[in-house]
Image (cartoon, rainbow, N blue to C red):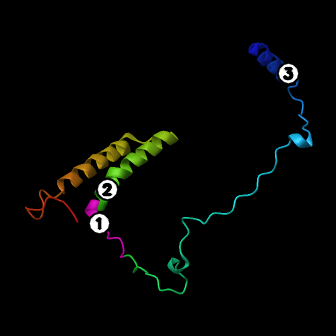
Amino acid sequence: MPRSNEDEAWRAIVDNYGDRAELAPEDLPAPEPEPEPQPDPFEVPAELVPTLDEERFVPPPAPPVPQPPRDRLLAWAGLFGSPAVLLFTVVAGIHLPSLVAYALVGAFIGGFAYLVAAMPKGPHDPFDDGARL
Protein backbone atom coordinates (compact mmCIF):
# COMPACT_ATOMS: atom_id res chain seq x y z
CA MET A 1 0.00 0.00 0.00
CA PRO A 2 2.82 2.47 0.68
CA ARG A 3 3.92 1.92 -2.89
CA SER A 4 0.67 3.37 -4.27
CA ASN A 5 1.06 6.51 -2.10
CA GLU A 6 4.58 6.94 -3.44
CA ASP A 7 3.37 6.44 -7.02
CA GLU A 8 0.61 9.00 -6.49
CA ALA A 9 3.11 11.48 -5.04
CA TRP A 10 5.41 11.08 -8.04
CA ARG A 11 2.47 11.37 -10.44
CA ALA A 12 1.43 14.62 -8.71
CA ILE A 13 4.95 15.95 -9.01
CA VAL A 14 5.13 15.10 -12.71
CA ASP A 15 1.65 16.50 -13.42
CA ASN A 16 2.43 19.80 -11.67
CA TYR A 17 6.00 20.16 -12.97
CA GLY A 18 6.72 23.79 -13.81
CA ASP A 19 3.71 25.15 -11.90
CA ARG A 20 4.41 27.59 -9.12
CA ALA A 21 3.30 26.38 -5.71
CA GLU A 22 1.00 28.72 -3.84
CA LEU A 23 1.23 28.46 -0.08
CA ALA A 24 -1.31 29.72 2.39
CA PRO A 25 0.01 32.20 4.96
CA GLU A 26 -0.31 29.61 7.73
CA ASP A 27 1.86 27.19 5.71
CA LEU A 28 4.74 29.67 5.43
CA PRO A 29 7.63 29.03 7.82
CA ALA A 30 8.08 31.50 10.64
CA PRO A 31 11.12 33.77 10.21
CA GLU A 32 13.97 32.80 12.48
CA PRO A 33 15.42 35.47 14.75
CA GLU A 34 18.87 36.65 13.78
CA PRO A 35 21.61 35.25 16.00
CA GLU A 36 23.61 37.61 18.15
CA PRO A 37 26.97 38.50 16.60
CA GLN A 38 29.83 36.53 18.09
CA PRO A 39 33.19 38.19 18.77
CA ASP A 40 35.81 37.45 16.12
CA PRO A 41 38.35 35.00 17.60
CA PHE A 42 41.00 36.21 15.14
CA GLU A 43 40.66 39.92 15.89
CA VAL A 44 43.97 41.55 16.80
CA PRO A 45 43.92 43.65 19.99
CA ALA A 46 44.17 47.38 19.35
CA GLU A 47 47.43 47.73 21.27
CA LEU A 48 49.13 45.25 18.91
CA VAL A 49 48.05 46.98 15.70
CA PRO A 50 50.91 49.19 14.46
CA THR A 51 50.20 52.82 13.83
CA LEU A 52 51.62 54.85 10.98
CA ASP A 53 53.74 57.08 13.20
CA GLU A 54 55.83 54.20 14.61
CA GLU A 55 59.34 53.77 13.33
CA ARG A 56 59.63 50.99 10.83
CA PHE A 57 62.67 49.05 9.71
CA VAL A 58 63.89 50.25 6.34
CA PRO A 59 66.50 47.94 4.87
CA PRO A 60 69.53 49.50 3.27
CA PRO A 61 69.64 49.56 -0.51
CA ALA A 62 70.82 46.32 -2.06
CA PRO A 63 74.35 46.28 -3.43
CA PRO A 64 74.66 46.18 -7.22
CA VAL A 65 74.72 42.78 -8.87
CA PRO A 66 78.33 41.80 -9.52
CA GLN A 67 79.29 41.45 -13.15
CA PRO A 68 80.92 38.16 -14.12
CA PRO A 69 84.25 38.21 -15.93
CA ARG A 70 83.95 38.62 -19.70
CA ASP A 71 85.10 35.10 -20.48
CA ARG A 72 82.40 33.55 -18.29
CA LEU A 73 79.80 35.97 -19.60
CA LEU A 74 80.59 34.89 -23.16
CA ALA A 75 80.46 31.23 -22.13
CA TRP A 76 77.03 31.69 -20.56
CA ALA A 77 75.84 33.61 -23.62
CA GLY A 78 76.98 30.74 -25.82
CA LEU A 79 75.34 28.18 -23.55
CA PHE A 80 71.93 29.87 -23.46
CA GLY A 81 71.99 32.26 -26.39
CA SER A 82 72.89 29.80 -29.14
CA PRO A 83 69.98 27.40 -28.53
CA ALA A 84 67.62 30.36 -28.19
CA VAL A 85 68.70 31.76 -31.56
CA LEU A 86 68.47 28.34 -33.21
CA LEU A 87 65.02 27.71 -31.75
CA PHE A 88 63.81 31.14 -32.85
CA THR A 89 65.01 30.61 -36.42
CA VAL A 90 63.38 27.17 -36.62
CA VAL A 91 60.05 28.42 -35.26
CA ALA A 92 60.11 31.54 -37.44
CA GLY A 93 61.07 29.53 -40.51
CA ILE A 94 64.22 31.54 -41.12
CA HIS A 95 66.91 29.67 -43.03
CA LEU A 96 70.41 30.13 -41.64
CA PRO A 97 73.52 29.53 -43.69
CA SER A 98 75.22 26.29 -42.68
CA LEU A 99 78.31 28.10 -41.42
CA VAL A 100 76.23 30.25 -39.02
CA ALA A 101 74.29 27.22 -37.75
CA TYR A 102 77.53 25.31 -37.12
CA ALA A 103 79.00 28.37 -35.37
CA LEU A 104 75.98 28.51 -33.04
CA VAL A 105 76.29 24.81 -32.22
CA GLY A 106 80.02 25.31 -31.64
CA ALA A 107 79.33 28.28 -29.35
CA PHE A 108 76.97 26.10 -27.29
CA ILE A 109 79.46 23.26 -26.98
CA GLY A 110 82.36 25.62 -26.37
CA GLY A 111 80.50 27.59 -23.68
CA PHE A 112 79.55 24.40 -21.88
CA ALA A 113 83.08 23.00 -22.10
CA TYR A 114 84.62 26.26 -20.85
CA LEU A 115 82.26 26.49 -17.86
CA VAL A 116 82.96 22.88 -16.90
CA ALA A 117 86.71 23.38 -17.27
CA ALA A 118 86.62 26.60 -15.20
CA MET A 119 84.83 24.94 -12.28
CA PRO A 120 86.90 24.70 -9.11
CA LYS A 121 88.46 21.28 -8.73
CA GLY A 122 87.86 20.99 -5.01
CA PRO A 123 86.64 22.95 -2.00
CA HIS A 124 88.69 25.91 -0.84
CA ASP A 125 88.83 24.39 2.63
CA PRO A 126 89.50 20.63 2.66
CA PHE A 127 87.28 20.25 5.71
CA ASP A 128 84.38 22.15 4.13
CA ASP A 129 81.52 19.83 3.20
CA GLY A 130 79.45 22.60 1.56
CA ALA A 131 76.95 23.08 4.37
CA ARG A 132 75.95 26.67 5.13
CA LEU A 133 74.31 28.03 8.26
The reply to whether dot 1 and dot 3 touch (C-beta < 8 Å) is no
Which residue corresponds to mark 1? 68
Q: Main secondary structure of the magenta part?
A: loop
Q: The residue under label 2 is which amino acid type?
A: Trp
Q: Residues within 10 Å of mark 1 (few under 14, many from 20)?
A: few
Q: Residue 78 has which mark? A: none
User: x, y percentage for residue 106?
Assistant: 29, 46
* Above-or-below relation of 38 to 115: below
Give the CA distance from mark 3 to mark 2. 78 Å
Give the CA distance from mark 1 to mark 3. 83 Å
Which residue corresponds to mark 2? 76
User: x, y percentage for residue 60?
Assistant: 39, 81
Stretch in magenta: 63-72
Which residue is at 26% across, 62% downward? Answer: 71
Give the CA distance from mark 2 to mark 1. 10 Å
Which residue corresponds to mark 3? 12
* Above-or-below relation of 26 to 14: below
